Image (tube, helix red, strand yellow):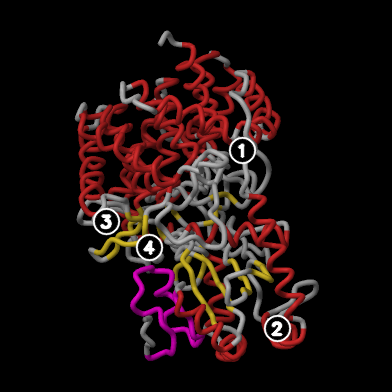
Amino acid sequence: MAQLNSAGNRLAEEKSPYLLQHAQNPVDWYPWGEEAFAKAGNEDKPVFLSIGYATCHWCHVMAHESFEDRQVAELINQTFVPVKVDREERPDIDAVYMKTCQILTGRGGWPLTLFLTPGKEPFFAATYIPKEGSFPQTGLLELIPKIPRIWMNEREKVTKGAREILGHLRRTGSGSQGGLPHRSILARAVDDLSQRFDRMHGGFGNAPKFPSPHNLLFLLSQKKGENDRRLLEMVESTLLSMRKGGVFDQLGFGFHRYSTDKEWLVPHFEKMLYDQAMLSLAYLEAFEATGNAFYADTADEVFSYVLRDLTSLEGVFFSGEDADSEGVEGKFYVWSTSEIRDILPEKEAEVVIKAYNLKDEGNFRDEATRQLTGRNILHQLSTDLLKTAGDLGLSFEDVQILLDQARRKLFAAREKRIRPLLDDKVLTDWNGLMIAALAFGGKTLEREDYSLAASRAADLLLEKMRDNEGNLLHRYKDGEAGIPGFLDDYAFLAWGLLNLAEATGNMRYLTAASELTRKMLLHFRDEEQGGLFLSADYAETVLVRTREFYDGAIPSGNSAALMNIVRLIRAGENTGLQQEMQGLVQAFSGLIQSQPTGFTYFLCGLDLVFDTNSQPK
C-alpha cells in the first residue's frame, strides 16, 4: 500500500524523479496501482490521470500553476482520485492514453491529462490545461466543477463514450499485414524525405524541427548502395546545421531535445540520453561514409558530455537533464554579452561574441511575450571563422585557440550556476542505445575507452536488470531494479550487445544478444496479427496490449528487433529466426507501403532482408 506522506500524497516512496517532484503537492496523488482504482470504485469517483516526465518543461508549468495551488488541489481531491504516472517508467500506460488523446483531440504531448472511470476507461483527454482559461481554452478552475454533474447525471453517456474509445483503441492496435514489399519502397522513402528536406537549414519539415537521426541512418544506408550525392547532401547539411546551431550545447556539448524553429537556433533545452545515443550513431555513420573528421569530433564531444554528466559511478547512464533551472527554461545555458566580458579577457570576449553571434539585446526571446531578453544562445549558424579572423585582424589558428580557451573558461563559470535537475533513473532501453553508440564509436574511432564504457554498462545491466526467471527489468534506481521489461528494453539492449560483440570480438555479447532476442520473441509476439507487443505476456495489460510500429523520436522496438534478427542470422545465429524475420516484415507491410517515411529504421532492416533473401542459402 502506498504510504501517505506529511504533504498528504503517496509518492514519497517512489523511485521516479518525476513522481518525487510531486511528492509534496497538496494534490492527493496516488501512484498507478490497484489501490487508487479500488478507492475510485468504492467512492464512485472518476480518476484524474496525469502523465509526464521529469525533464518536461510544460509538465513543470502545469505543476507550478495548478498542482502546487491549494485551490486547484482541493477541487481535484474532492472530485477525483488523482494518479500520477512517469511515462518513461511506464511507456505502456502512456501509449494507451496518448492514443486516446490523439483520437479525441487530434493531437498529443505532455503533460497528458485524462479523466478515467474506475475501470481505467478514458472519457476525457487533453495535454497541458492552464489553471484559468482564456478563450478558446478552458482552465481547470472552470472545467473541474462541471465533472460531478456530468459524472452523476450523465453516467450512461460517459460510460458509452468510454467504451467507444476503448473499441477505437483496439482497432487502432491492428496492423496491416501483407507480403514482402518490393525493393522500390526504399526509393519511395528516399523521394518522400527529399520532398520534405529543408535545403536552406537542413532537417525535414518545418518548425518545430526534430533531429530524427534514424532518417539520416536510412539515407546513409541507401547512399552506400546507390552512391547518390543527393542523399549525402541531405545528411551532411542536417548534421552540420545541428552541430552549429543552438540545439547543440556549444560549451558543454551534447544535444538538446529539438529546435523550436526551423533554423536549429532556439532549442527545447532538455537533454535526453536517447538523443545523445542516436545522434552520435548518425555522426559516426557520416564519418564512415565521408572520412570528414568534423563528424568524428562531434561524436567525441557527445560522448564526452555523456561520460561526464550522464554516467553513474557504477558505469550505467542516467536518463537526461531538465530544460529548466531556477524555474526558468534555458536559464543555465544562455548568456548576456556583459557576462561574457566580465569573465573573459577583452580579446577572447571579442572573439566569442562575434564567433557565437551574440548581441547586446540578446537573441533569445521570452516564450510568452516574444520580447528579446538580453540573453543569448551560443551558436555558429551564420559564422565563418575565416571571416571572423579577418574582421578581427587575427589568423584563423589564433581564433581557434582563443575560442577553445574561452570555451573552457565559460564552461567553468557555467558550472557554478544552479544546474538543471538530473533525471538519475537508469532505463534499460535507453542504456541499450547508449551502449550501441559507444561500442560503435569504439570500433569506428579506434577508442578502446568507449568500448570499455559500453562493456561496463552492458555487464551491469545483464547482472542486475533481470528477475529470477531471467526476464529483463526496465528501471534501475538507488541500487534497486524494478518494473517488468518492455519490448524496447529487449530490442535496444540486444542492439547494444551486437555492437559490443563487433567492437570487442567478445562472443559472449553475441550469445547474450541471441538469448535476449529469443526471450523477446517468446514473450512479446502477437500470434494473431504478427509483430511484437510493447509489453510482455506476463506483465500488466492496461486496457489493450499495444503494438508500436512507427519510428518516432527513436526507432520503434519492432524496427530494432527486425535489424537485430537480420544481424543474428548473418552471424550464424539463425535457428528459427528466418521465419521470425519474414513474419515481422509481413506484419507491417501494408503500413510501410502507405507511409514509408514513418518507418525509416525498419527500412534499414528491410534493406538487409532484401540482401539476405537474395543470398544463396
Residue 407 or 243: which is nearer the viewer? 243
Asked which secondary structure carries label 2, the reply is: helix
Q: Which of the 4 quarters of the picture holds residue 594?
A: top right
| Residue identified by numbered label 4 | 423
Q: Which of the 4 quarters of the picture holds residue 414?
A: bottom left
Task: Looking at the image, tell me whether mark 3 or mark 1 is earlier in sequence order.
Answer: 3
**Badge nearest the viewer, 1 or 2:** 2
* Gap between marks 1 and 2 measured at Cα: 39 Å
* Gap between marks 4 and 1 measured at Cα: 29 Å
Quarter placement of the C terminus: top left
Q: Main secondary structure of the magenta part?
A: loop
* Gap between marks 2 and 3 measured at Cα: 42 Å
| Residue identified by numbered label 2 | 151
* Image coordinates for residue 611, horizontal then vertical, percent: 48, 16
Q: Amino acid at mark 1?
A: Gly
* Gap between marks 3 and 1 measured at Cα: 34 Å
| Residue identified by numbered label 1 | 598
